[in-house]
Amino acid sequence: MAAPYATDPQNPRGRLYSEEESYFRSPFQRDRDRIIHASAFRRLKHKTQVFIEHEGDYFRTRLTHSIEVAQVARTIAGTLGLNVELTEAIALAHDLGHTPFGHTGEEALDALMQPYGGFDHNAQALRIVTDLERHYAEWDGLNLTWETLEGIAKHNGPVTGDIPYALAAYNDRHDLELHTHASAEAQVAALADDIAYNNHDLHDGLRAELFSTDDLAELPILRDCFARVDAKYPGLNYYRRRHEALRRFFGVLVEDVIKVSQRNLTELHPATVHDIRHAGRMMVQFSPELWTDLKVIRKFLFTRMYRAPAVVDMRVVVTKMVDDLFPFFMQNPNELPKQWRKDVADAPDQAALARIVADYIAGMTDRFAIQEHTRLIGGEEIPAGVIDGS
């Protein structure tokens, strides 16, 4: 049964372009399906999560990460009585704006774009679903519902201060009420992201032998998880032992979010989703105690995985690739694909050209960025390796 503060699929706030809704799919199911079929979603399979996509078949990519986020988000949303389809749509779309090479690529592109308004992957996700996916006859983008767009734009909280240009440009056309919190569904998607990457980065770091099982067993939360496994399964195989401990860790995070969020919602007693948006604080949260422990784990991952010496070396290599590609396309826009050159011809100034180039580079997969750098600029193929975190 849906909670009174859940987003009502029978009464959405509409789409930028009016269209007849489906008689067998809710508006949010339709949003989810459009996201899954988007070109940008498919490209996530070859984009860095932590490891360059060709490092190994077992490591997460942005695509598998997004699927794991959606799975966690569905579980939490269903337990809280929220709209599961809206939650899933936001979760699947949350990383569409990521550049090649993860956050390292984003940092490089943001630095290059500073004279033109900067670059932000959350804002770029909105730009993709409202403009850059150009397949439909009647509009650019996917024409998603207001609720899904709101969730993509501000699932991490209200957007204040300097608003990224990609977000500001769309908001001028279709007010997403950036000063308020998002729906509870969007808040669930944000916490599901945290749960998913903290869990799977531990898995992937172990597989890459950047740290050991013994290292994990000394960390808060995980210490208790290993103890429970050892008590129930003494002498368990090394690989099964760590898997059992990590699945318990995963469960601890999910259960904590559900418990704390239920308490927050009971205290607020919201009657509608409007009450959630204007509560003045996030309703979906970790407990302070778990968040304190989780920060220790995040620091461990940052030191041992995201900023290990080999990782720092790799960050230099891929940063140079982005640093080379951006000025190359600014000086040689005729090297852009044919469908992009039409936009270049219509660009009124250097800022508009820079945004076209940034859109193009941001859309590249790891492997395509490497191939294009080799083809256009030269240099050796990049070796496989870790780049960065979440």
Image (cartoon, rainbow, N blue to C red):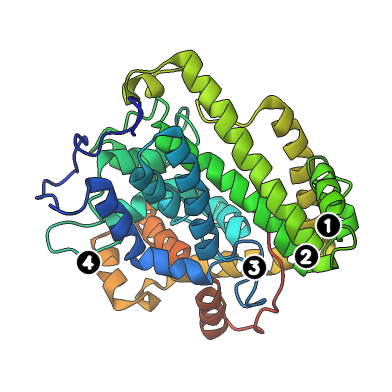
Tell me the crowding category of disc 1: few under 14, some 14 to 19, or many 20 or more residues within 10 angstroms, Cα based.
few
Q: Which residue is mark 4?
A: 135
Q: Earlier in the sequence, mark 3 or mark 1?
A: 1
Q: Which residue is mark 1?
A: 233
Residue 225: % across, % down: 79, 46
Residue 386: % across, % down: 71, 67
Can the viewer see residue 333?
Answer: yes
Left or right of 388: which side holds 184?
left
Left or right of 208: which side holds 125?
left
* Mark toward the viewer: 4 or 2: 2
* Mark toward the viewer: 3 or 1: 1
Q: Secondary structure at mark 4?
A: loop
* Mark toward the viewer: 4 or 1: 1
* Mark toward the viewer: 4 or 3: 4
Tell me the crowding category of disc 2: few under 14, some 14 to 19, or many 20 or more residues within 10 angstroms, Cα based.
few
Amino acid type, callout 4 = His
Distance from the alpha carbon under mark 4 to that under mark 3? 31 Å
Distance from the alpha carbon under mark 4 to that under mark 1? 54 Å
Is disc 4 in contact with disc 1, using a CB cutoff of under 8 Å?
no
* Mark toward the viewer: 2 or 1: 1
For image coordinates 28% across by 52% down, the residue present is 29
Q: Nearer the viewer, residue 167 or 255?
A: 255
Amino acid type, callout 3 = Val
For image coordinates 38% across by 24% down, the residue present is 277
Amino acid type, callout 1 = Tyr
Is disc 2 in contact with disc 1, using a CB cutoff of under 8 Å?
yes
Q: Secondary structure at mark 1?
A: loop
Q: Secondary structure at mark 3?
A: helix
